[in-house]
Amino acid sequence: MPRTLWDSSVGKKTVMAVSGVIMLLYLVAHMIGNLKIYFGADEFNRYGHWLRTVGEPFMHYEWTLWLIRVVLVVAVVAHAVSAYQLSRRDIRARPNKYVHKKPRASYATRTMRWGGIILGLFIVWHVLDLTTGTVHSGGFQEGHPYQNVVDTFSTWYGNVIYIVAMLAVGLHIRHGFWSAAQTLGVGGRTRDRVLKTVANALALLLTAGFIAVPVGVMTGVVS
Ligand code: HEM
């Protein structure tokens, strides 16, 4: 991207929108994939195995998975760096320093900022929990994601961490989707209303779909 575009606010917002859409597509696929847990251990574990062999024989074992990981890491970093720089720019752009105390950022800005930080921390926890097993509660078994997921949601803190994160995901997407649509120049009053409805529906569907997994384990439907 030309330097001047990256230096502009619109450029940074575009980076946020595009990286956000990439992560959103990943989340939709991940949520749908997770729901396969309701079809039993065999099917879910087979799906986990497929994630590592997809693209074969052209791709080597885990190459596609690593490609996705690299794209996601680039998207997360680009998203976080532009968010940070945009918020610094916001502060610098104020004409004078506030004499008393700083006024609070708007509700949406605060939710996005804190939601983003919570999600960043959650992703680190989540990878250490279900991919590497480093902080996993039971005896982590490589190649048996079904049992690992059941273990995670058999502890109270596992449920709390994931459910709080899922609610943060919903709020973040609700506002983020809407902002992205504005940055990318979709406009008009009717279209705005449609976009807001789409943003709400998407956020609700994703949150409910993700939360269905811990709920399944807590109620004993998945065990
Ligand atoms: C109830 C909710 C969730 C469950 C049960 C869940 C489950 C899992 C499982 C089992 C894996 C490992 C798959 C494998 O190695 O075969 C995984 C990987 C992953 N999850 Fe989730 N997930 C949930 C929510 C989320 C959310 C909300 C995000 C992002 C904000 C997320 C991001 C990821 C990422 C990036 C990986 C890939 C890690 C890697 O292999 O490099 N997950 N998830």
Image (cartoon, rainbow, N blue to C red):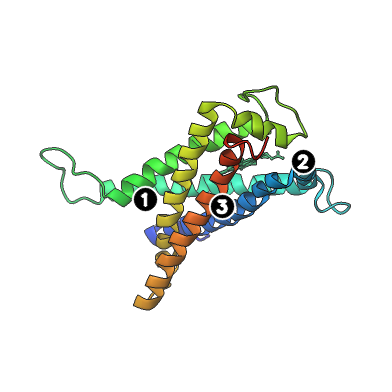
Residue in the image at 50% along x and 59% along y: 202
Residue in the image at 43% along x and 56% along y: 174
Q: Position of residue 148 (x, y in %)?
A: 68, 31
Q: Is residue 128 visible?
A: no
- Residue type at numbered disc 2: Asn
Q: Secondary structure at mark 1?
A: helix
Q: Are marks 2 and 1 in contact (CB under 8 Å)?
A: no
Return the disc, 3 or 1, that comes first in the chain's sequence.
3
Residue occupied by mark 3 = 23
Q: Is residue 106 left or right of residue 76?
A: left
The yes-or-no answer for disc 2 within 8 Å of ligand 1 is no
Judging depth in this view, the residue of 39 and 110 nearest the camera is: 39
Disc 2 residue crowd, few under 14, some 14–19, many 20+, Cα 10 Å? some
Residue occupied by mark 1 = 86
Q: Secondary structure at mark 2?
A: helix
Disc 3 residue crowd, few under 14, some 14–19, many 20+, Cα 10 Å? some
Dividing the image into four equal quarters, which quarter contains ligand 1? top right
Residue in the image at 83% along x and 43% along y: 61
The yes-or-no answer for disc 3 within 8 Å of ligand 1 is yes
Judging depth in this view, the residue of 126 and 222 nearest the camera is: 222
Which of the two discs, 2 and 3, sits closer to the camera? 2
Label 2 to label 1: alpha-carbon separation: 42 Å
